[in-house]
Amino acid sequence: MSFNIYDFTSFTQSIHDGLSSVMAPGWVTFTELVIVGIVFLAFYALTGLALVYIERKVCAFIQNRVGPNRVGPYGLFQTVADATKLLLKELLMVHKADKFLFNLAPYIVIVASFMALGALPFAKGLHAIDLNIGVLYILAVTSLSVLGILIAGWSSNSKYSLIGAMRSGAQVVSYELSVGMALLTVVLFTGSMQLSVIVESQVDGWWIFKGHIPAFIALIIYIVASTAEINRGPFDIAEAESELAAGFHTEYSGMKFAFFFLAEYVNMFFVAGLAATVFLGGWMPLHIGGFEAFNRVMDFIPPIIWFFGKTFALIYIIMLFKWTFPRIRIDQLLTLEWKYLLPINLFNILIVALIVMMGWHF
Amino acid sequence: MPSYISEPHQVIIGEDEKYVVNMGPQHPSTHGVLRFELTIKGETIVNLVPHCGYIHRGIEKMCESNTYQQIIHLTDRLDYMSAHQNNEAVSLCVEKALGVEVPERAKVVRTILSELSRLSSHLLWWAAFGMDLGALTSFFYAMRDREKILDIFEENTGGRLIQSYICPGGLMYDIQPNFAQRVKDLLAYLRKKLPEYDRLLTGNVIFLNRTQGIGRMSKEMAIDYAVTGPAGRGSGFSCDVRRYEPYSAYDRVEFKEILYTEGDTFARYKVRMDEMWESMKIIDQLIDQIPDGPHTAKMKPVIKLPAGEYYQRVETAKGELGIYIISDGEKNPLRFRLRTPCFSNLFVIDKLAVGTKIADLIAIFGSLDLVIPDIDR
Amino acid sequence: MNGFTKYFSDLFKGVSSLLKGMRLTSGYFLSPGEIVTEQYPENRATLKLPKRAKGEVIMPHDDENHHRCTGCGICENSCPNGSIQVITRKEVNEEGKAIRVIDKHIYHLSMCTFCGLCVKDCPSNALAFSNNFELAVFDRNKLTKVLNRPGSSLKKENKAS
């Protein structure tokens, strides 16, 4: 087994060869799918746990206090304790709720984020689903979570959950437009929707530098719109405690609530990871086209560290949004999208199209 | 189904799609136990009825069986953020009735403590207001700074929130020798921290959109409903008792009465932020000149007010507090009536909030700065 | 044209105000300065409360188990809600006179409002506030305390003759 931290293709190839020598090709594919599924499940759970702990520590430092520090050294096992508590809680069933839909809703949300996570390129050779319509696939799959939210609100048989779900549904559907169009700018620059091609095209510089102003505007719009997509930060009216309608997941308890909770955090990771891939180069180190010595030094750090570093920098920015700003009212939220973000987005795409035609990008 | 479980009733949605909802006594935003009965249509509030009384403890009745020194500890627990100002109000009323002259040292220290408790009340208001609107960090910044004020209170009076320190005649004990130095250090610290609050909330575009133009109260409405304090001054109603009927050491300090004319939530917010700076200016003028002398006048152990009616008003952090005592010559008052500011300030909310959205109700309610025990006594 | 410029100036002013707020909070994240959180149960040894902090009311006894309470009952009258009960008994002192001596000074911690009137009004300074604030108990009867210790007696004042 050759393990090269700079290029995982040799590692995955050696696993594939090892399996092919012991079983038939059909079984090899099946075993590989099972292995990938298990690895992703473990990664999903670990990311969720780690992000909950990181958020609590980040918000504690912003608020000039300490955060969890009793359960384990520096409070590292706090999320494990929280997860154990949620596992042991009674799963309440709301009276006269639609049982099938009530149980189905958390799974839809989890499955949607799971499917999206598989399409991210983590490092060279660590790319589970590499479709040639990568960006389109991601947009399609993340739209499934709206279904989960609406089903959760409807099947809870409570007027407050329904109001919260409708508000949340309106918010998510509006901001999907901005997300899609912000990603379109980089697709225009690259000429392909395949994520690995987008990452490869940033070998002489990230698109945020090569595409200068339009790409920068697109990144800002993307971060704002996707924070609204995942119901976080200043856009969290759906789950705000100090408002009246308490949101679509009010009636859920125990592990089903934990699913919604976990899906929100892993969605945050996914959104940051996608921004890092498309705008900041994914696993590509920081290269400046033409400075060979600089590029060699940057190549020294393994690509997987680059990917996680960029992702966590963007996650920090998303967390900062939540803990600094007050909440936006629902009508101001929709005003922001339809009157500000969407026109700027459309204008941006026009400019990008002009730049690509004229060859004015780097 | 067992008989003790009642049949679930259908949700009845009235004609015109209005439905009634309780913003119940326990709610994170109502700062105490207050119930709002909201009739909403979609997201807009059509009718609003506040129900108070969940924390009525019968303070006025209890005061009828207590002597005048024992009333002090009960008034602490009204608007507990301005405990010193409540104690001062009762003490001033009793001293006015008896004709007792309070020594200068006590007057100056009373004023300094009043302004410190006004500062601490406004800091807590800012913390809770930011938290209600969703900016959760504002809570921690303001509470961290408020702790320094409470440390000074604990050192001198023994209690952080409930002090019972200002009593008829003067002060209960003399202040500690390092009082002036600690207050000066505190003011230097606060002057560095208050601009940070402006950076976090006041200039923020999201905050401005949530508070400007919301809950407009005209000056006539403020006068009609007797909305005093910063809530009234945000509409241009000039009602500062410290200026019109100065008591304690207020006649020898220079300070501005903060008035804004817009009358919306943001104006009330700005009034309180500016009042914090004015309080610091007042303390600055007094802190270096605390006169020496006795800390209390000589009072008889048993205080009996001459028969008659006595009224004293005081500017607490929330508005004008009035103490009305009817005495028949005994050592207990015949009738002890409190005119609390939050009671009048509460009942203007149905005029302000009807026609707005639920999220605006939270902002308006936060800007009125109500402490529920003050409403219910 | 006016609306056009207003649109963009609103946008830029809004974004810059948001950035100011973010700079403040990330400043706190990167250099928190002084963390004021006290790790409470672990720091009991170094915890110092101000001398006047109102814990519970105690009757200070000196090394020979003397207190200063004469059983006059002024604290019982001053207390607003009857948290103090003073029970006295008659004793014959060495000069043969029948005097009043404190038998039990009962203090109901469950009803005390910490107003401080008993401490202030006592003519012989027999009562004081301690700094002990950990007063929670599991049994309500433990909240009724007898402040004078068993076997203690009034401190004899040396009167200048």
Image (spheres, coloured by chain):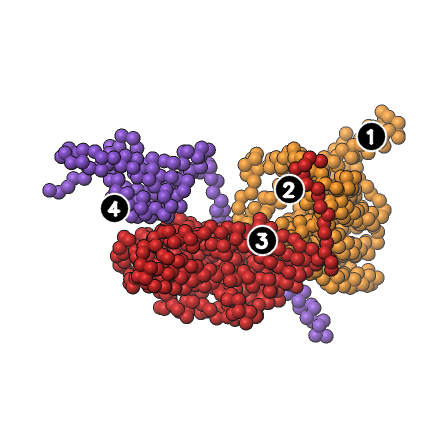
Residue C75 horizontal/vertical position (percent): 30, 44
Disc 2 to disc 3, C-alpha distance: 34 Å
Element carrying mark 1: helix
CA–CA distance in space, label 1 to label 3: 60 Å
Q: Which chain is red?
A: B
The residue labelled by disc 2 is A52
Visible residue check, residue B304: yes
Q: Are marks 3 and 4 on the same chain?
A: no
Type of amino acid at the residue the image marks with label 3: Arg
Q: What amino acid is found at the position of numbered circle 1 in the picture?
A: Thr
Kindly report which numbered mark, 2 or 3, lies closer to the viewer in this rendering. 3
Assign a secondary structure to mark 4. loop
* Chain coloured purple in this rendering: C
Residue B219 image position (x, y, % from top left): 54, 71
Mark number for residue C123? 4
Circles 2 and 3 on the same chain = no
